[in-house]
Image: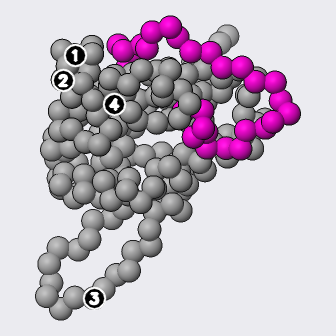
């Protein structure tokens, strides 16, 4: 008789504990200053990360986060996300995760790599945006991703939506987060057209 199996569901409101332990090592140390003026205490990094995790999973707007859900306002969550992004916190985390993957899963599958891109709207603009050819010339960005032979991400860059994949490919290959071995056979494949409706 077969045992019943249950499928683990993603908890959209809480970053998994093992991932949090890795991420918190990348976060800046907080210097707590005692203030006699009072005021609201600083929101915990854990609560902020849970809110960021929720936004990344659901795709909702920052302002859609309710204070009751995480005990922190949407403006604080967005401000801290931007600060950590500028400090390179998420790049450090990606490198740590790739190193962990390489160590625990027999190394990066260098023999075959694949790259692709996805257009995304960017109504608020920014440095890395351009006129999106798939969205009537509206401001947009393109997420370019390179994965190893088993599908693990090893490089990701953001470019303007109007930038052709063949131009972005060099930057994507050069920004691989782990040292590429020179002595191993390596091949890279890319689609003829970028997949614009995948995610």
Residue 135, label in figure: 1
| Residue at image coords 42%, 20% | 164
- How far, Cα to Cα, is label 2 from label 1? 6 Å
> x, y (%) of residue 105?
74, 35
Q: SS at mark 1?
A: loop
* Magenta stretch in the rendered image: 172-199
- How far, Cα to Cα, is label 2 from label 4? 11 Å
Q: Nearer the viewer, mark 1 or mark 3?
A: 1
162 w.r.t. 172: above or below: above
| Residue at image coords 34%, 81% | 32
- How far, Cα to Cα, is label 3 from label 2? 48 Å
Q: SS at mark 2?
A: loop
Q: SS at mark 4?
A: strand
**Residue underneath mark 4:** 160
> x, y (%) of residue 152?
61, 30
- How far, Cα to Cα, is label 1 from label 3? 51 Å
Q: What residue occupies the far right of the structure in this picture?
A: 183
The crowd level at tag 1 (other Cα within 10 Å; few <14, some 14-19, many 20+) is few
| 184 in the magenta segment | yes
**Residue underneath mark 3:** 34
For marks 3 and 2, the one nearer the N-term is 3
The crowd level at tag 2 (other Cα within 10 Å; few <14, some 14-19, many 20+) is some
The crowd level at tag 3 (other Cα within 10 Å; few <14, some 14-19, many 20+) is few
> x, y (%) of residue 4?
57, 18
For marks 1 and 3, the one nearer the N-term is 3
Quarter occupied by the C terminus? top left
């Amino acid at each position: 008789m077969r045992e019943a199996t249950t499928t683990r569901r993603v908890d959209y409101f809480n970053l998994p504990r093992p991932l949090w332990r890795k991420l918190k090592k990348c976060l800046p140390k907080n210097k707590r200053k005692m203030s006699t003026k009072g005021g609201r205490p600083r929101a915990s990094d854990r609560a902020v990360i849970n809110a960021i995790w929720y936004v990344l999973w659901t795709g909702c707007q920052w302002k859609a986060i309710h204070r009751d859900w995480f005990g922190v306002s949407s403006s604080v969550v967005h401000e801290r996300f931007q600060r950590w992004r500028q400090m390179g916190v998420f790049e450090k985390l990606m490198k740590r995760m790739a190193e962990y993957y390489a160590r625990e899963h027999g190394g990066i599958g260098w023999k075959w790599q694949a790259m692709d891109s996805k257009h995304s709207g960017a109504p608020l603009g920014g440095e890395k945006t351009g006129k999106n050819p798939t969205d009537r010339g509206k401001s947009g960005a393109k997420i370019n991703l390179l994965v190893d032979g088993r599908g693990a991400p090893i490089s990701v860059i953001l470019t303007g939506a109007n930038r052709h994949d063949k131009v972005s490919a060099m930057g994507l290959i050069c920004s691989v987060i782990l040292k590429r071995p020179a002595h191993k056979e390596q091949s890279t494949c890319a689609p003829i057209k970028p997949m614009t409706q995948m995610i």
